[in-house]
Every structure is written in C-alpha cells, then in structure tokens.
Image: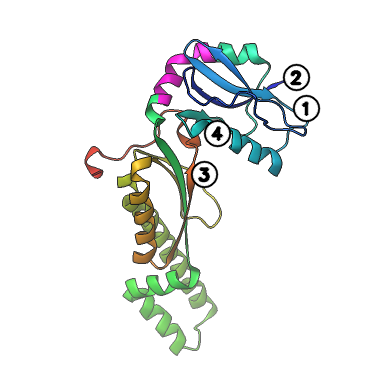
Amino acid sequence: MSTYIYGIASREHPALPDGMGGIGKPAREVRIVREGGLAAIVSDSPDDLRPKRHDLLAHQSVLAEAGAAGAVLPMRFGSLAPDDTSVAAVLGERADHYHERLRALDGKVEYNVKAQHDEQAVLHRVMADDPELRAFVEANKRAGGGSHEEKLRLGEAVVAAVQAREEADAVEVRRLLEPAADAVSVGPDGTGWLANLSFLIPRDRVERFLTAVKELGEKHSHVKVRANGPLPPYSFVEPGPAKPAADSRG
C-alpha cells in the first residue's frame, strides 16, 4: 500500500497531527515519519485515490491542524511514495532544501489572486483611451456599419486594443499587490484570466495585502479581482519564485 504525504515539518514541530483521521473512507489514520531533523505527515493511501471532495477536505484539514502551530511545507493533493521507508529516504536526501524552505515560509501564508476584465467596462475603457479607435467606430456607425471588410478591420482593432489592455492590466495587478508580498509565483494561464498570481504574505501583512486588493478593484473598475486565501503556501514549496525589489516593501 502506498504512503500518502500531506506535508513536511520540522521534527520539533509542536502540533504534528499524529493519530487524526486523514483521507479515505474509512479515514486513514495520520502518522509521522521522522528522519534527522524533519518529519513527514503521512497516512496509508486508498488504492482508488481520486480528488473527491471528502478527500480534498481531509487533506486540507490535516494541513490546517499542523500549520496552525508552525511552518509546514504542504504537498499537493495526491502526493504518494511507495512506502514510509521511501519517504524517510527523501527527507534525508533533501534535508537542506526542506530546512531552507521551512525557514523561508515560517509565519507566511499564500493568497491566490485571479483577475479578469468586465467585458462591457473594458470596451468603454479602450474606447476612452484610444481616440483613433473611437473615431473608427463613429465612422462605421455613420456609414451604417460599413462594408464587410471595414467591419472585419474594426473587429480586429477592438480585439487588439483589448489584448493590449489585458497585458497592461496584468502588469498593473502585480505592481499594486506585490509590495505586501515576500514572493510572487505566476500560475498557469487560464481562459478568461488576465492574471493568475500567488503571493507569499507574512501574517502581519495580510490586512495590508487585502486592502491593496480592495483598492485595486476600486481604482480599476473594469477589472474584476478575486483573492483566495489564506492558503498553505503550495506555490512556494520549491525555491525560485520571483521576488519583489527590496525597496518595494514598507
């Protein structure tokens, strides 16, 4: 039976959730695998493991229990090893890396921010910002819509203007929110999103960050912003996220 890994913590972590229920029905009992100065929070894995709501919530619950009292490196749902011995071997092999990440993430949480355009509002914005495009639209209206070729050219011009606005707004979202963060990780592109960013936020800067999110939405009414968190810092378990400039934080 495979070993399911919830997260990695220091061996001296004060609240390792040994014995609580984890994934599966019936819930598999959570146990701790220790190696050197590290501890992995694990359980047995069901043979038919799937991302079902019950198991996703159980995964989060175990991490929340452990993370409430100290730094934990959260593993993504579905992280498996052949057995406990293999887990211990990885802890030993990557000990320096895990210790560095635990120090870097101590006292910090992740917020994921997704931003997209309000379709009608962004059209008004690009028209207001581009006199030539606005004149093109007015000319077409006076011509009763214009020829087929003119309609195509107008459509292409509008699409290009909206795409340029998306690129500019993506930069603006990051610029306005980054100062409160210790690090930023760019997420995968998604249909409809102009920005998908994860921010590593010290707990004492969370209020400042959420205020910045609110002000972003107020300042740019054509941009719809959604912040999800606090989350375990999934996006920062591995090193290498982009870091803000040193002088960008107060």
CA separation, marks 4 and 3?
29 Å
Tell me which numbered mark, 2 or 3, is placed earlier along the sequence: 2
**Residue 90 placement (x, y as % from top left):** 55, 15
The reply to whether the magenta stretch includes residue 98 is yes
Q: Mark 4: which amino acid? A: Glu
State the separation of the CA atoms marked 3 and 1. Answer: 29 Å
Residue to which mark 2 is pinned: 1
Q: Earlier in the sequence, mark 4 or mark 1?
A: 1
Q: Position of residue 214 (x, y in %)?
A: 38, 60
What kind of secondary structure does the magenta stretch mostly adopt? helix
Query: Is there a contact, CB below 8 Å, between mark 3 and mark 1?
Result: no
Question: Quick check: 132 above or below 70?
Answer: below
Label 4 packing within 10 angstroms: few (<14), some (14-19), many (20+):
some
Q: Tell me, for residue 47, which label it has, or none.
A: 1
Q: Which residue is mark 4?
A: 65
Label 4 – label 2 distance at C-alpha: 25 Å
Residue 232 inside the magenta-drawn segment: no
Disc 1 marks which amino acid?
Asp
Query: Which label's residue is closer to the chain start, 1 or 2?
Result: 2
What secondary structure is marked by label 3?
A: loop
The residues bearing labels 4 and 1 have C-alpha atoms spaced at a distance of: 25 Å
Q: Earlier in the sequence, mark 4 or mark 3?
A: 4
Residue under label 3, please give it: 188
The residues tagged by marks 1 and 2 sit, at their Cα atoms, a distance apart of 7 Å
**91 lies above or below 49:** above
Rate crowding at label 1 as few (under 14), some (14 to 19) or many (20 or more) other CA atoms within 10 Å. Answer: few
In the rendered image, the vertical position of residue 18 relative to residue 226, given as above or below: above
Asked whether the residues under the numbered discs 1 and 2 touch, taking CB atoms below 8 Å apart as contact, a structural biologist would say yes
Q: Residue furthest left?
A: 247
Span of residues in magenta: 91-102
